[in-house]
Image (tube, rainbow, N blue to C red):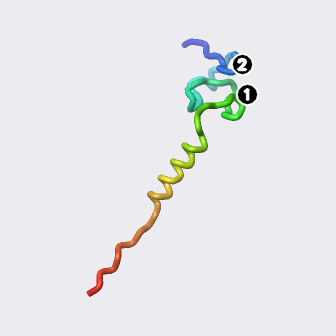
């Protein structure tokens, strides 16, 4: 297994944190793992809002129109 290093500071990443990359594709140490600390290029807010909108649309309960006799 190759030794991975933080993409921001170059510090060695512990085994426990390996294999959990950011959505931008890079791996970071515990200090730089949050998007705000490593100037992430991935738009996390847009992805969250897009997923939330699809979940809300799936939960809508729309009744059928009543047919008049």
Looking at the image, which residue sits at the far top?
A: 2
Q: Which of 20 and 46 is in front in this view?
A: 46
* Disc on the earlier residue, 1 or 2: 2
Q: Residue 54 carries which label?
A: none
Closer-to-camera residue (19/36): 36
Residue contact between numbered discs 1 and 2, judged by CB atoms under 8 Å: yes
Residue 11: x, y in percent? 71, 17
For this view, does 39 lie left or right of residue 57? right
Indicate the position of residue 12 as horizontal and vertical percent values. 68, 16
Residue topped by disc 1: 31
Nearest to viewer (mark 1 / mark 2): 2
Quadrant that contains the C terminus = bottom left
Crowding near pointer 2: few (<14 within 10 Å), some, many (20+)?
A: few
Q: Element under label 2?
A: loop
Mark 1 → mark 2, Cα distance in angstroms: 9 Å
**Residue drawn 52% across the image and 48% down it:** 50
Q: Is 57 situated above or below 3?
A: below
In this rendering, position of residue 25 left or right of residue 68: right
């Amino acid at each position: 297994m190759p030794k991975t290093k933080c993409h921001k500071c170059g510090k060695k990443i512990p085994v426990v944190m390996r294999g959990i990359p950011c959505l931008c594709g890079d791996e970071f140490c515990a200090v730089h793992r949050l998007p705000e600390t490593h100037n992430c290029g991935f738009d996390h807010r847009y992805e969250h809002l897009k997923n939330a909108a699809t979940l809300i649309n799936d939960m809508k309960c729309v009744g059928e129109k009543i047919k008049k006799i």
